[in-house]
Amino acid sequence: MTIERLLRGIAGFFIIVSLILSVYHSQDWLWFTGFVGLNLFQSSFSNWCPVMSILKKFGYKNEGASAGTTA
């Protein structure tokens, strides 16, 4: 599995969990939802996200890395 696919899955999981927590616990969890969305937005321009750095340390590769190129 590539970093890009994992990143989308992790972001989606965080958004769903924070929305559920905002309904059943506190609406302050919506700030976390906004943070995840803002981070996804900035990563579309910079191609960098903190989770990508963590996943690289765990040995996951970028999409192009398997073909001999790194992004």
Image: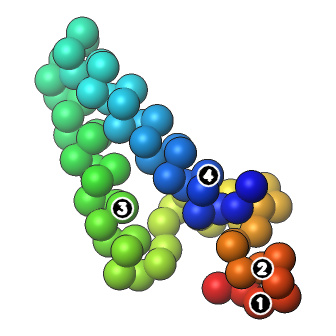
Using the image, tell me which numbered label, if any, was put on residue 40: 3
Specify few, some or many for label 4: CA neighbours under 10 Å numbering under 14, 14-19, or 20 or more: some
Specify few, some or many for label 3: CA neighbours under 10 Å numbering under 14, 14-19, or 20 or more: some
Q: Residue placed at 52% from the left, 44% from the top?
A: 10
Could you tell whether 46 is left or right of 25 in the image?
right
Which residue is outermost to the front?
67
Using the image, tell me which numbered label, if any, was put on residue 4: none
The quarter of the image holding the C terminus is bottom right
Q: Position of residue 7 (x, y in %)?
A: 55, 55
Which residue is outermost to the bottom?
69
User: What is the secondary structure assignment of the residue under circle 4?
Assistant: helix
Q: Disc 4 designates what residue? A: 6
**Amino acid at dot 3:** Leu
User: What is the secondary structure assignment of the residue under circle 3?
Assistant: helix
Q: Disc 1 designates what residue? A: 69
Q: Are marks 2 and 4 in contact (CB under 8 Å)?
A: no
Q: Residue placed at 50% from the left, 53% from the top?
A: 8
User: What is the secondary structure assignment of the residue under circle 2?
Assistant: helix
Q: Are marks 1 and 4 in contact (CB under 8 Å)?
A: no
Q: Find the distance from the CA under tag 4 to the CA under tag 3.
A: 13 Å
Q: Residue placed at 61% from the left, 52% from the top?
A: 6
State which tag comes first along the sequence, 1 or 3.
3
Q: Find the distance from the CA under tag 1 to the CA under tag 3.
A: 24 Å
Q: Disc 2 designates what residue? A: 65
